[in-house]
Each structure stands twice: as structure tokens, then as C-alpha cells.
Amino acid sequence: MTRRMTAFAVLMGGLMGCQAADSSSPVAPDQNQARSDTAASASAAADRERIVPLPDDQLPQTEAAWKERLTAEQFDVLRKHGTERPFSGEYAETKESGTYHCAGCGEPLFAAATKFDSGTGWPSFYDVIGDVGDHVATQDDKSFGATRTEVHCRRCGGHLGHVFKDGPPPTRLRYCINSVSLNLGPTDASIGPPAD
């Protein structure tokens, strides 16, 4: 599938949020580019500040309080279940190492080591930190006349995206997540590796 065809398919599917991934295999970068990307990622990770989750007593209790805390786009996605445009998000194509946290409350959600290029234009991960329900929770989403599995932050309930069963091994899952619902921080060794 060409990039133009993929972009068209993603745009058409964008009304329903993340949809089917491009079935073609991603092209592996050359070794020199991979070394350069790794060095840049390590440098960027060292520059990021550690993200600390909000204490429970500081979590907003009303939608009005969330609206004050979040940007307009974050509020639309996290609290109103919106979807950012494909290929528009900050983390759609980043390869930096670290831990992705909920932009609403700081809860750790995904290890960057589980991120992969799905070709959809949204950050995609094949696993969550811990087990489903520890940090990331799911529920049925029957909007737009289809049944999908919504992914949200277990702690604050913020909408993150959807999960599909067309990802790579070992899980065969694709957590298709809106960039705006995430913040990337340095790797947090206290969190532990993703679940097997």
C-alpha cells in the first residue's frame, strides 16, 4: 500500500478514531541512521524532566477544573473522547526512549520500548506498563455504529485511544493512542518492564 493510499485510508477511518493498521511491513532504517537516532534519543531522554503523577488530592473533580488544567486539544481528547488528526501529533513518529505518561494526571502508561510504527499516523504500542487495569484500563466503545475497545487512564479516566488485535508479536495488540493524551518522560526504573 503506498503512503498516499495509507494516508487516505487513515483519514477516512479517522472519523472513527484509530482504525486498521497498514498491513505492509515497515522499512528498516539503515544502520547509520539507527545509530544516529539512538544517540539523539539518549540525549533527548537525559534532557527531559521526570514526570510525577498528581497526588490524589490534586486530581480535578469536575470537568470545569479539567478544562482549566488541560489545553483545549487535550481536553477534547482526554475528557470529550475526541481524536487528533493522523500524523499531526508530537509523538506520532518519535523514536525517543522513555516512559509515556497520561497528560492529564501523570500516570505511567507505556514504555517507549513497546512503541512501533503502525503506519496509521498515531503513536502505537504493543503493550502497556504492568497488566491491563494497573495503569491502562479498557471498555467497550459502541460509538459510530461499531464496537471497539476504548483505552483510558485507569487513574483519571482520560480517553487515550483504542486497542486493536492487529499488532506485532509478542502480544499481537496495537494500542493506538492520541499523542495529545501523552507526555514522554525519562525511563522510570521503578515501574518495571512491560507485562509478558
Image (cartoon, grey):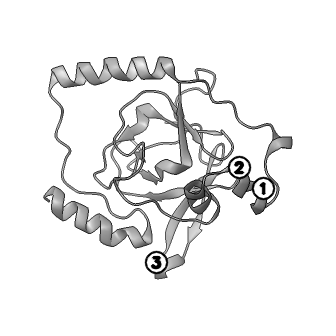
Do the CB atoms of the residues marked 1 and 2 lie less than 8 Å apart? yes
Residue at mark 3: 146
Task: Please identify the quarter of the rendering in which residue 96 is found.
Answer: top left
Closer to the camera in the image, 9 or 49: 49
Label 1 vs label 3, nearer the camera = 1
3D distance between C-alphas at marks 1 and 3: 32 Å
Number of other residues with Cα within 10 Å of mark 3, as a class: few under 14, some 14 to 19, many 20 or more: few
Q: Residue at x 65, y 61 (%)?
A: 79
In the rendered structure, which disc, 3 or 2, sits on the residue that comes first in sequence?
2
Query: On the image, numbered disc 1 is attached to which residue?
Result: 65
Residue 77 vertical placement versus 94 (above, below):
below
Dot 2: what SS? Answer: helix
Q: Residue at x 41, y 17 (%)?
A: 43
In terms of depth relative to the viewer, which is nearer, 196 or 8? 8
Cβ atoms under marks 1 and 3 closer than 8 Å: no
- As measured in the structure, the alpha-carbon distance from the residue carrying label 3 to the one carrying label 2 is 32 Å
SS of the residue under disc 3: loop
Q: What kind of residue is marked 3?
A: Ala
- For mark 1, give the secondary structure: helix
Relative horizontal placement of residue 65, taking residue 8 as reference (left or right): right
Residue sitting at x 33%, y 46%: 168
Kind of residue indicated by mark 2: Arg
Occupied quadrant, residue 113: top left
Q: Position of residue 59 (x, y in %)?
A: 79, 46
x, y (%) of residue 163?
47, 57
